[in-house]
């Protein structure tokens, strides 16, 4: 019995040591070059206070520790890594202890791809997918187009950000269903109003009475991801044109980026 107890203590101690060790590694946050890349490319990061910038850097490093990013048909660089990690961190920035348990790998393709995950041959034919969250045998995988990822963080980009879009799908999926209803994040009393709000806005988009991208009418999951892009990319404009949607997403993400 004593030996069993000792073994249990050793196992627990080793586990805690490993966790502490991993946490200590993240204290060394990012290299100066990587921080410069955040300054150069991530507008969200530049708007943060000095304290929040340090926290953002820490969350980026934690993500890079936990999730493998792999280039397919391209040589991965630090800009790619910073953009993918920032796409992941931005939606969950207010959720201090939340991590992505539903993704282990992010595959970065050079350009858009088709439903068979092909990005070469038959130029343009069916290759219009900029990003996707895998399901079935691809569960735990995300694929992003590098061109779309970079465009999402460019200075002159509009309301779109493919990286944020796909990671919002993962938040949506965290409750077991990718249905546009983030039950794990939106307070229960707001679920029904949110569903009603989604359907009302989808009708407006279909009637040409909204500036939200028409892709949001595909289904509720795409609506949630598309308006989330808008919320983070152009928060002041989104708040002005869609105050009720803005307030609902502010409750969902625990953030007020327009302030």
Image (spheres, helix red, strand yellow):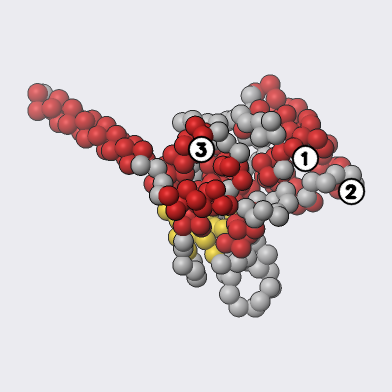
Q: Quadrant of residue 91?
A: top right
Pair 3/1: label in front: 3
Q: Can residue 147 be seen in the rendering of this structure?
A: yes
Residue 116 percent coordinates (x, y): 58, 66
Going 66% across and 31% down the picture, which residue do you hit? 256
Residue ID for mark 2:
208
How far apart are labels 3 and 1 at the CA level? 24 Å
Mark toward the start of the polypeptide (3 vs 1): 3
- In the image, residue 185 sits, relative to residue 138, either above or below, namely above
Mark toward the start of the polypeptide (2 vs 1): 2
Residue ID for mark 3:
53
Residue ID for mark 1:
237
- In the image, residue 84 sits, relative to residue 98, either above or below, namely below
**Farthest left residue in view:** 2
Q: Dot 1, how many residues are within 10 Å of its Cα: few (below 14), some (14-19), or many (20+)? A: some
Going 60% across and 78% down the picture, which residue do you hit? 121
């Amino acid at each position: 019995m004593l030996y069993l107890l000792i073994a249990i203590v050793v196992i627990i101690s080793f586990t805690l040591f490993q966790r502490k060790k991993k946490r200590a590694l993240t204290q060394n946050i990012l290299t100066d070059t990587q921080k410069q890349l955040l300054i150069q490319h991530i507008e969200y990061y530049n708007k943060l206070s000095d304290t929040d910038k340090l926290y953002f850097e820490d969350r980026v490093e934690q993500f890079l520790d936990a999730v493998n990013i792999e280039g397919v048909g391209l040589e991965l660089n630090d800009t790619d890594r910073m953009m993918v990690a920032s796409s992941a961190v931005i939606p969950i920035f207010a959720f201090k202890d939340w991590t992505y348990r539903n993704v282990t790998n992010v595959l970065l393709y050079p350009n858009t791809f088709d439903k068979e995950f092909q990005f070469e041959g038959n130029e343009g034919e069916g290759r219009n997918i900029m990003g996707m969250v895998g399901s079935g045998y691809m569960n735990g995988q995300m694929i992003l187009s590098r061109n779309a990822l970079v465009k999402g963080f460019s200075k002159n980009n509009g309301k779109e950000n493919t990286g944020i879009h796909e990671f919002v799908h993962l938040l949506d999926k965290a409750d077991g269903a990718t249905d546009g209803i983030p039950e794990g994040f939106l307070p229960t009393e707001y679920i029904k109003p949110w569903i009603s709000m989604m359907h009302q806005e989808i009708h407006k988009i279909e009637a040409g009475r909204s500036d939200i991208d028409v892709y949001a009418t595909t289904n509720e999951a795409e609506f949630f991801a598309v308006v989330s892009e808008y919320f983070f990319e152009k928060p002041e404009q989104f708040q002005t044109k869609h105050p009720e949607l803005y307030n609902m997403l502010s409750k969902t993400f625990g953030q007020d980026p327009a302030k």
